[in-house]
Image: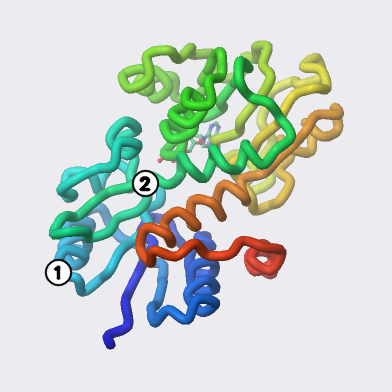
Amino acid sequence: MKIKKYFVIGNPVQHSLSPKLHNYWLKKNSIEASYDKIKLEESQIKNFIEEIRQEKINGCNVTVPFKKTVIPFLDKLSLEAEQTQSVNTILFENGNLVGHNTDIAGFTRAIKDLNFNIMGKKVLILGAGGVVPSIIFALNKMQVSEIIVSNRTREKAENLKLNFNNLKILDWGALTEFDMIINATSLGLNKETINLNFSKVGNNKLFYDVIYNPTETNFLKEGKKLGNQIENGKSMFIYQAFEAFKLWHKIEPEINKETIETLDND
Ligand code: ATR
């Protein structure tokens, strides 16, 4: 039998831990397949996706900045992908190229694992990039009371209102009351700090960072120092990969201590 081929596409994609996790699960489940990362230019996306239709490639994950770019080349979208205009998993199914969004399930499960009741709570999101529509969709499903978005480029936050009309927008650099704050910017990947003064926010909040490498960004360190609950994006990352694996291979891969450690030794 021919070895099946899977990829994560993005630009940059160097940092992606998806190959590590998927290859680990493929081996564990004795599935004859490979999973690699591939950096693409926007002009190469169409041809790449055609190869999935021709079943030369069996599926792919999509990361920044292509989660929306891939949509015109697909035949069908899942409801979640449609409503967020964001695709992170592609497969060829019953003659159709289908785009799914497993970031939503990833974020939802990550939050459910925490000892934090989010229903009816006020959430402040920093950033308006690729993953934010998925987070907003998930938060709405979890029935939070209010979602406020603050982004350096205000227009990008305003654009999110086209899909999510219940959003509030806050100026970049300003702070408001919240129960949960999410860093969805790339600030922290290279040890940057976010220029906000959290000293008055109290100590019963949840500080959540989408970044998981480093494990504790300055943003999370600050939240922790003030006595708040903190969580990084690692379990979201693992759960979105779990959902993609399930879509492609019809198997639920195991998530345990070893799985989590697989991602640590970099
Ligand atoms: P993309 O914007 O291409 O989807 P992303 O990594 O998903 O990429 O998002 C990056 C996020 O980090 C954006 O919200 C970005 O803000 P802008 O929309 O203003 O670019 C934010 N970000 C990156 N560097 C930043 C910085 N130095 N200060 C503030 N926000 C920053």
Does 225 sit above or below residue 245? above
Mark 1, other Cα within 10 Å: few <14 / some 14–19 / many ≥20: few
Q: Disc 2, disc 1: CB below 8 Å?
A: no
User: Residue 27: x percent and y percent?
Assistant: 51, 79
- The answer to whether mark 2 is within 8 Å of ligand 1 is yes
User: Which color scheme is applied?
Assistant: rainbow
Q: Secondary structure at mark 2?
A: loop
Does 47 sit above or below residue 157? below
Question: Which residue bears the numbered disc 2?
Answer: 65
Question: Which residue bears the numbered disc 1?
Answer: 54
> Residue 80 vs residue 245: left or right?
left
- Tally of numbered discs: 2
Query: Who's the residue at 27% across and 59% down the image?
Result: 91
Who is closer to the viewer here, 22 or 19? 22
Q: Secondary structure at mark 1?
A: loop
Going by the picture, which residue comes out furthest to the front? 251
- Say which label, 2 or 1, has the lower sequence index: 1
**Amino acid type assigned to the residue bearing label 2 in the image:** Pro
Image quadrant in which you'd find residue 205? top right
Single out the mark in the foreground, 2 or 1.
Answer: 1
Query: Who's the residue at 48% across and 57% down the image?
Result: 241
Query: Who's the residue at 68% across and 26% down the image?
Result: 117
Image quadrant in which you'd find residue 28? bottom right
User: Residue 233: x percent and y percent?
Assistant: 61, 45
Image quadrant in which you'd find residue 92? bottom left
